[in-house]
Amino acid sequence: MNNKNIILVGQFGSPVGLKGEIKINMMTSSFEVFKNLKNYYNFDGTVAWNFKNILFKNNKCVVQIEEYISREDVLQLKGQKIFSNKKFFPKTKDNEFYINDLTDCMVFLEDKSSIGKVLSVQNFGAGDLLEVKYNKKLILIPFDKTNILSVNINKKEIIANPISGILN
């Protein structure tokens, strides 16, 4: 599998009951997106999980996996990450981006001078932050209209105007 097309969508949590159901800590934008993905894999695609039921109970995603019939069966999955192929995701709207599309983009100032490459996208609760290596240190640029002027995914370029103090 091409790693650029594989997206982290969740992580197995604790078993629920005795019949092989398990909680999923979703990492998608909504339950509906998670439920409609169709295919779920481990990190390298060597294991595929077929979910018989995907339910939303008490504000939690709970699944039942084919061939897993007991609490002991699903207990071994706890903590494992769940991935899916990008082709199963809905198309993004204007000015919406998937994190893996932003990763590896080059960030430039308006005068086209380079700031650096996006290493990852972080979110500590107040919004997305682009993690960029700049002058041998890591900086975080808020991914908002004030700091990001344009994004061209096809060219892998982001034009930024970081607020005062970020580049110092």
Image (tube, rainbow, N blue to C red):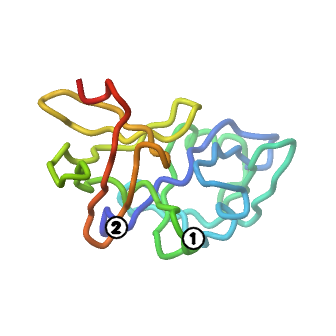
Asked if the residue at tag 2 contacts the one at tag 1, i.e. Cβ–Cβ closer than 8 Å, the answer is no
The label number, if any, that marks residue 153 in the structure image: 2
Q: Residue at label 1?
A: 93
For badge 1, the amino acid type reads Lys
Neighbor class of circle 2 (other Cα within 10 Å; few <14, some 14-19, many 20+) is few
Residue 73 visible here: no
Q: Is residue 25 above or below residue 44?
A: above
Judge by depth and name the residue closer to the eye, 87 or 52: 87
Identify the image quadrant of residue 140.
Answer: top left
Indicate the secondary structure of the residue bearing disc 2.
Answer: loop
Name the residue located 50 percent from the left edge and 36 percent from the top edge: 123
Q: Measuring from the top left, give residue 107's x and y in whole percent.
A: 25, 50
Q: Measuring from the top left, give residue 14's x and y in whole percent.
A: 68, 36
Residue 98 appears left or right of 2: right
Query: Distance from label 1 to label 2 (Cα)?
Result: 13 Å
Residue 76 visible here: yes
